[in-house]
Image: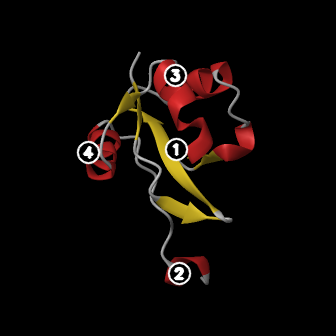
Amino acid sequence: MTVYIDPPNWPGHGRMWSHMVSDVSFDELHAFAASIGCPARAFERDHYDVPAHRYADAVRAGAVEIGSKELVRRITEAGLRRRKRAAAQKND
C-alpha cells in the first residue's frame, strides 16, 4: 500500500492544505484516510484535502511525502486522475 501526500502549500478557508492520493486505487485511499480519521467529506474527485495540522499524522501513519507535481504525475500515470470539468462544459 502506498499513499502519497504533498506539502501543505494550498490555501483555502483560512488555512493551508495538502493533497493525499493513492496510485493503486480509491479503495486503498479511502481505507487509509479512514484509518487516520480523515472525514469522507474531505474527498474531492481523486484526492483527500488534509489540513496542515494533520499532515504529520498522515506521514506517521505511512503516507509518503512527495512534491505536488510528482503527486499529480503518479495518479495520472495510474489512471486515477479526475480533472475538474471545464467551465464551458459545466454550462452545457
Label located before the other in sequence (2 or 3):
3
Instruction: Identify which amino acid the numbered label 3 is placed on.
Output: Glu
Position in image of residue 35 (x %, y %): 65, 19
Q: CA distance from mark 1 to mark 2?
A: 21 Å
Mark toward the start of the polypeptide (1 vs 2): 1
Q: Residue 48 placed where, x, y %?
A: 57, 42
Which mark sits nearer the N-terminus, 4 or 3?
3
**Of tags 2 and 3, which is closer to the observer?**
3
Q: Residue at x 56, y 56 (%)?
A: 16
Residue 80 in percent (x, y) is at 41, 41
Q: Which residue is mark 2?
A: 87
> What's the amino acid at mark 2?
Ala
Question: What label sits on residue 70 in the rendered view?
Answer: 4
The correct choice, above or below, for 11 with respect to 38 in the image is: below
Report, in whole angstroms, how far the alpha carbon at label 4 lies from the one at label 1: 14 Å
Q: Residue at x 67, y 65 (%)?
A: 14
Q: Nearer the viewer, residue 14 or 4?
A: 14
Give, as a three-letter code, the residue at label 1.
His
Would you say 75 lies left or right of 40 here? left
Q: Earlier in the sequence, mark 4 or mark 1?
A: 1
Q: Which residue is mark 3?
A: 28
Quarter of the figure with residue 50: top right
* Residue depth check, mark 4 versus mark 2: number of the one nearer the observer: 4
Residue at the spot x=52%, y=22% of the render? 28
Give 78 or 35, whichever is nearer the viewer.
35
> Which residue is identified by label 1?
47
